[in-house]
Image: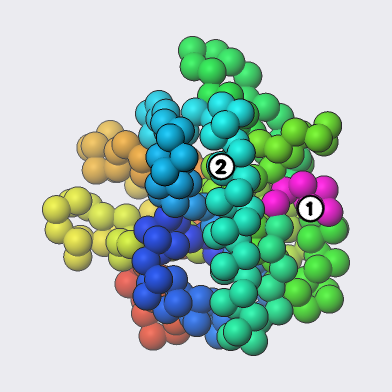
Amino acid sequence: MEKLSIIKIGGNIIEDEISLNKFLKLFSNLKGNKILVHGGGKRATHIASKLGIESKMVKGRRVTDPETLEVITMVYGGLVNKNVVAKLQALGTDAIGLTGADINSIQSDKRPVKDIDFGFVGDVKKVASKSINKLLKADFTPVFCAITHDGNGQLLNTNADTIASKIAVGMSEIYDTSIYYCFELNGVLEDFNDKESIIKKINSENYQKLLKEGIISDGMIPKLDNCFDALNSGVQKVHIGNTSMLTKENNIFTTITL
């Protein structure tokens, strides 16, 4: 089975031109089949405030009203995505920028209203792995932003970590898939105040222990739950760390397995 790497980058890398350029160089040099997934929440918040649109967050998740959805579509699907694609072309990577609506690649359901109405937020239900594979087979590198659609003409704001995980699961029918979640830290930390205290390996057993001891908390919980969902659905390995984990020289990051 051929290998496929799915790399997700967060807002902090996108916001910093030097970090972004450095990452894209590493991504371009990565051999084999690869897909890039990016967010852009910080940029969206910044541009929304310039337009006088207040960003509403509940438990770290964005509430997406119609006005916010317009900003997200412009920022994620336009500004951030096309900037990344242009930079990759300059590095010799033939990238193609996509939302989940393009080639009907990622369909979602609008999140049902329970305690909170998140507005136009999507929960992924279907990834068109065969269509995405056609792009890979044609030597294109897909670059997905964090937007999906419902199949009835409605775009939906969707968590980028989840998109990376669901694409990896969908593609695992065809490839031996690995996910790389790149962010500003070197991995999952045992002590948040000690940036060197990286937990190198997490499996389902020691994950429960880390949760009980409160070592893994807050925003890291949904990220890791996503990782285990992916592993339970056919993904081979998940890695969390800074962008240098894409180089052979760096072995300081967190690897998550069953």
Q: Using the image, determine if residue 57 lies above or below residue 184.
A: above
Q: Quadrant of the N terminus?
A: bottom right
Q: CA distance from mark 1 to mark 2?
A: 19 Å
Q: What segment carries the magenta color?
A: 99-105
**For mark 2, does the 10 Å Cα neighbourhood hold few (<14), some (14 to 19), or many (20 or more) residues?**
many
Which residue is at the front of the view, 115 or 223?
A: 115
Tell me what residue is drawn at x 40 percent, y 40 percent.
49
* Amino acid identity at mark 1: Asp
Q: Looking at the image, which is closer to me, 240 or 153?
A: 153
The picture places residue 256, in percent across and down from the top left corner, at 45, 56
Q: Amino acid at mark 2?
A: Val
Question: Which numbered disc covers residue 84?
Answer: none
Q: Are marks 1 and 2 in contact (CB under 8 Å)?
A: no
Q: Quadrant of residue 211?
A: top left
Q: Is residue 56 left or right of residue 252?
A: right
**Position of 142 compared to 243: left or right?**
right
What kind of element bears circle 1? Answer: helix
Please say whether residue 172 is visible from this viewpoint.
no
Q: Position of residue 224 (x, y in %)?
A: 44, 45
Q: State how many labels appear.
A: 2
- Toward the front, the furthest residue is 51
The answer to whether residue 219 is magenta is no
Whether 46 is drawn above or below 218: the answer is: below
Q: Nearer the viewer, mark 1 or mark 2?
A: 2
Q: Residues within 10 Å of mark 1 (few under 14, many from 20)?
A: some
| Mark sitting earlier along the chain (1/2) | 2
Horizontal and vertical percent position of residue 240: 42, 60
Residue at image x 30%, y 38%? 217
Residue matched to label 1: 102
In this orientation, which residue lies closer to the viewer: 8 or 170? 8
**Quarter holding residue 154:** top right
